[in-house]
Amino acid sequence: MVNDFFILMKSELLLTAIIFLLLFIKIGKGISNDTQLVIIQFLLLGNLTAGFFFNRTGVLFDGMFYTNGLIVFQKSILSLGLYLISLMFSNWFRKHEHMPEFFILMLSAVLGMFFLISSGNFLMFFLGLELATIPVAAMVNFDLHKKISSEGSMKMIFSSAFSSGFLLFGISLAYGATGTLDFSLLPLLIDGGPLQIMILVFLFTAFAFKLSIVPFHLWTADVYEGGPFAASAFLSVLSKASIAFVLMEFLYKVFAPMQDVWYNLVMVLSVATMIVGNLFALRQQNLKRFLAFSSIAQVGFILVGITGDPAEGTSSVVYFILIYTFSNLAVFGIAGLIDSKTGKENIDDYKGLYQTNPFLSWVLALALFSLAGIPPTAGFFGKLFLITSGASNGNYLFITIAALNMIISLYYYLKIIRAVFMDKNDDPIQPLTVNRSEKLAFSICGAAIIFIGFFSWIYEYIQSLYA
């Protein structure tokens, strides 16, 4: 029993150990930020590596916690994103006087995401969700000298509190209607009655706030703009990935008897999310706000994949999020590096970047091509599988709208690439020093964006995990 506990909760226990170690490092004196960052990066690399060993399927705490191969892979994607963030924003971390606190908050949020993904009961789910949310609000406020950072943090707290209210009301109705909070028992007691449709709507609304699904997206751009790039990247990639993983489990398993109801709901909101995200991204000049609306549009494509068959939908969404992690973090990392060195955040500031920083320009171009779904980057294959999954129900009008939105997104992604490679600038960004950690992270992302799409065994491996 003890061995089961340590093996099944390996990921959570490792993160907890790292958090306590960072607390002891913070209490101690005389350790520079450079040394602390190197230690943290090695610890996060060890945490990522450990995710590939001694994995088992099992249940703990009378079904409140469970894990299997697919869940471990999803946690590994989050651990990968965590490690890449520690590398990409190393220049900002070294300068910040409260660097250990930021990592403690970030690791605590990821710990909540791990419990969220492994939850088999509404109580564990709610606790994991709150642990995954509250530290991020503090991370958004980490640019202490900027008023906009505090504003963004407050907006996130208010929106999170509002979504938690919807969630708790939905949970209370679910318990009143079925007499259980256990995810394995709920599908047996759901028959699609009016009260249960209301439960689905309340719970989905809570997910919609966290995922920035239209019309629950209004907080996103302000929070991204207010927070430091490291916090915005974490929120855009890791937070959204964890919620997307859990949303699939809810729809495919807990609410499987109500598929006809939630399919129409997800389809309509997917279309709205893609269109609104794309149209607002077209107008943005600030890169953080641009990436916020870009991420909203990407969530719309994730919903396209979720509307498909459970096996194909799960495989395509997990595969896409793996690619999205590399692509979106690369853009955030380069933008964060430029911001920390020059203070420039607007798209017009990137004009002529290729003339002075060719390495950063090429990685940025690859990442934007991948987000746009342009072949032969991995993003093309990711969106192809999402659309293929969505098409499995035969709703070709829905798929046509999704494809047209891909075409619209080409304009605003290519607008940045044109500014970087073709437009002239009288005052271009000067050549920037890229340290070894940042260069390693950008190289990993660039290589992954090029090669993941051609390694078919990755998608096949994800499919095998679902089976």
Image (tube, rainbow, N blue to C red):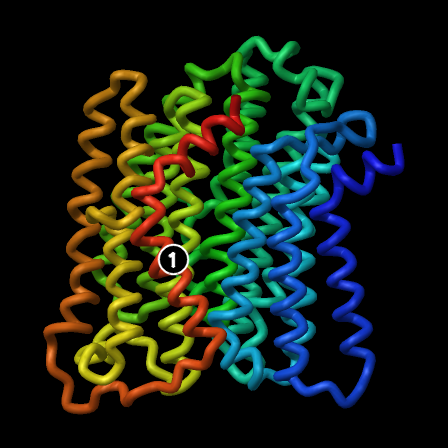
Q: Amino acid at mark 1?
A: Asn
- Residue at image position (75%, 28%) is 59
On screen, 367 above or below 431?
above
Q: Residues within 10 Å of mark 1 (few under 14, many from 20)?
A: many
Give the x, y percent position of residue 115.
69, 42
Q: Compare residues 38 and 187 and report the one nearer the observer.
A: 38
Give the x, y percent position of residue 322.
44, 46
Q: Is residue 273 visible?
A: no
Along the horizontal axis of the image, is 85 left or right of 296?
right
Give the x, y percent position of residue 422.
10, 73
Which residue is denoted by mark 1 in the rendering?
328
Q: Compare residues 422 and 439 and report the one nearer the observer.
A: 439
User: Looking at the rendering, which quadrant does residue 253 occupy?
Assistant: top right
> So how many labels did they put on this image?
1
Q: From this viewpoint, which residue is outermost toward the right?
A: 2
**Helix, strand, or loop for circle 1?**
helix
On screen, 369 above or below 273?
below
Give the x, y percent position of residue 144.
58, 80
On screen, 119 above or below 442?
above
On screen, 429 above or below 437?
below
- Residue at image position (50%, 15%) is 258
State the quadrant of the N terminus: top right
User: Looking at the rendering, which quadrant does residue 412 occupy?
Assistant: bottom left
Q: Is residue 289 visible?
A: yes
User: Looking at the rendering, which quadrant does residue 5 occupy?
Assistant: top right
Along the horizontal axis of the image, is 60 left or right of 130?
right
- Residue at image position (74%, 45%) is 10
Along the horizontal axis of the image, is 116 left or right of 467?
right
- Residue at image position (26%, 16%) is 394
